[in-house]
Image (spheres, rainbow, N blue to C red):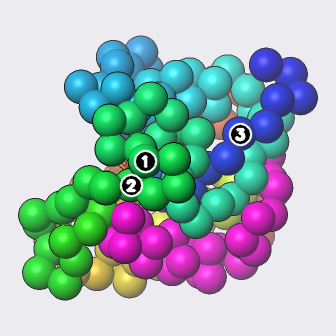
Amino acid sequence: MKNKRINLRIHHFFDIIRAFGKGENNLSPHPYGHSFHKIAMIIRNNPDLKIKNVIGCDSVCEGCVHYKKDYCDDSIDYRKDFVLKEKFNDQIDKRIIEKCSIKKGEILTTIQLCEKAKLYLDNIEFIYSGNDLWHTEQRKEDVSKGLKLYLELHKIKLDSK
Ligand code: SF4
């Protein structure tokens, strides 16, 4: 896996860190057939992995029944303002990269993305505004916990900024 690069929507990165926080270290394949579980393992084992920030289908989407090569055809039913999952994901990712000062197409390592987590967590209510607040607060707690576990696993201390 050394030197390999993956493409990732930034919210998928934090979803993976959140899964670690929930104790989901060995994820099972999803019924959709996507690669979330595989990418989570790659990230778990590779703090130096290079991750290209994309807005659109990414390495997680590989194998998914909703992956139509250049777009996602899945829908969501928990928002009044969005039906297409792709449109909602685009909004979330644009908010995250803006708040975390990441450029579209920028390549950062896993640890460099972990360094962005504080900005993500500080802005999470804005990023997920429109979702149930209790759900966002739970997400915040799980991402914080997952980040701590990930850094402990790799014996990494982030610079406090
Ligand atoms: S194609 Fe859509 S549903 Fe499938 S993994 Fe990608 S974003 Fe998720």
Cα distance in 3D space between marks 3 and 1: 19 Å
Task: Please name the amino acid that badge 3 sits on.
Answer: Ile
The image quadrant where one finds the N terminus is: top right
Image location of residue 64, percent across then percent down: 38, 35
Cα distance in 3D space between marks 1 and 2: 6 Å
**Label 2, on which residue?**
72
Q: Residue at x 28, y 31 (%)?
A: 32
Task: Compare residues 116 and 72 and report the one nearer the observer.
Answer: 72
Q: Residue at x 86, y 22 (%)?
A: 2
**Mark 3: is the Cβ under 8 angstroms from ligand 1?**
no
Q: Residue at x 71, y 78 (%)?
A: 101
**Badges 1 and 2: C-beta atoms under 8 Å apart?**
yes
Q: Residues within 10 Å of mark 3 (few under 14, many from 20)?
A: some
Image location of residue 47, percent across then percent down: 75, 33
**Label 1, on which residue?**
68
Looking at the image, is 106 positioned above or below residue 112? below
Q: Main secondary structure of the magenta part?
A: helix
Cα distance in 3D space between marks 3 and 2: 18 Å
**Label 3, on which residue?**
6
Looking at the image, is 78 positioned above or below residue 107? below
Image location of residue 132, percent across then percent down: 15, 71
Q: Earlier in the sequence, mark 3 or mark 2?
A: 3
Task: Please name the amino acid that badge 1 sits on.
Answer: Lys
Numbered badge on residue 56 = none
The range drawn in magenta is 86-110
The image quadrant where one finds the C terminus is: bottom right
**Mark 2: is the Cβ under 8 angstroms from ligand 1?**
yes
**Mark 1: is the Cβ under 8 angstroms from ligand 1?**
yes
The reply, left or right, for residue 71 in relation to residue 94 is: left
Q: Inspect this view and state whether residue 111 appears.
A: no
